[in-house]
Image (spheres, rainbow, N blue to C red):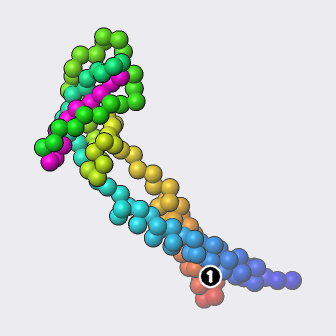
């Protein structure tokens, strides 16, 4: 009958490979995605209505006036011109929002979890050999 170290050794070895092999490339991919992402900036702007739709106009960092129609229908006559904070993409200024941008960090989180599992399994395997 096999003892506990004989059974635990192959399991920890497998978990090391399961963690490191996909985890490290996912961290590299997440780093590449973060490097290619365009930064967003904020500016003071005004809301306006045009043809039943809501629009936003602002002056960007290069002193160009930008106007964009949002996907939201304007309420009938209830909107007067009011100032808002506009968040816009510096690479593509037509990509804007009234809320701050949210970045999807799924690849980064999954990479850290898998790499952590691989690292803990490696440490556990080394402790199993030592003890």
Q: Is 114 drawn above or below residue 53 in the view shown? A: below
Image quarter where the N terminus lies is bottom right
Image point (17%, 38%), residue name: 65
Image point (20%, 35%), residue name: 58
90 falls in the magenta region:
no
**Outermost residue, bottom direction?**
130
Horizontally, residue 105 falls left or right of residue 118, namely: left
Residue 52 point in image, percent of width and height:
36, 18
| Magenta segment | 53-62
Front residue of this view, candidates 33 and 7: 33
Residue 21 point in image, percent of width and height:
58, 75
**Outermost residue, front direction?**
51
Q: Quadrant of residue 30?
A: bottom left
Image point (76%, 79%), residue name: 7
Front residue of this view, candidates 80 and 34: 80
Would you say residue 121 is visible in this rendering? no
Image quarter where the C terminus lies is bottom right
Q: Which residue is mark 1?
A: 125
Which secondary structure class fits the magenta region best? Answer: strand
Front residue of this view, candidates 125 and 107: 107
CA neighbours of label 1 inside 10 A, class few (<14), some (14 to 19), many (20+): many
């Amino acid at each position: 009958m096999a003892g506990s170290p004989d059974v635990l050794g192959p399991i920890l070895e497998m978990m090391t490979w399961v963690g490191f092999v996909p985890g490290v490339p996912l961290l590299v991919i997440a780093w590449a995605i973060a490097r290619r992402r365009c930064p967003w900036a904020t500016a003071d702007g005004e809301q306006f209505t045009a043809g039943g739709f809501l629009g936003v106009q602002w002056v960007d960092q290069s002193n160009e006036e930008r106007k964009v129609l949002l996907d939201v229908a304007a309420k009938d006559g209830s909107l007067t011109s009011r100032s808002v904070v506009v968040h816009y993409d510096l690479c593509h200024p037509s990509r804007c929002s009234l809320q701050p941008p949210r970045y999807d960090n799924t690849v980064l989180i999954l990479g850290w979890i898998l790499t952590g599992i691989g690292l803990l399994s490696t440490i556990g395997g080394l402790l199993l050999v030592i003890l």
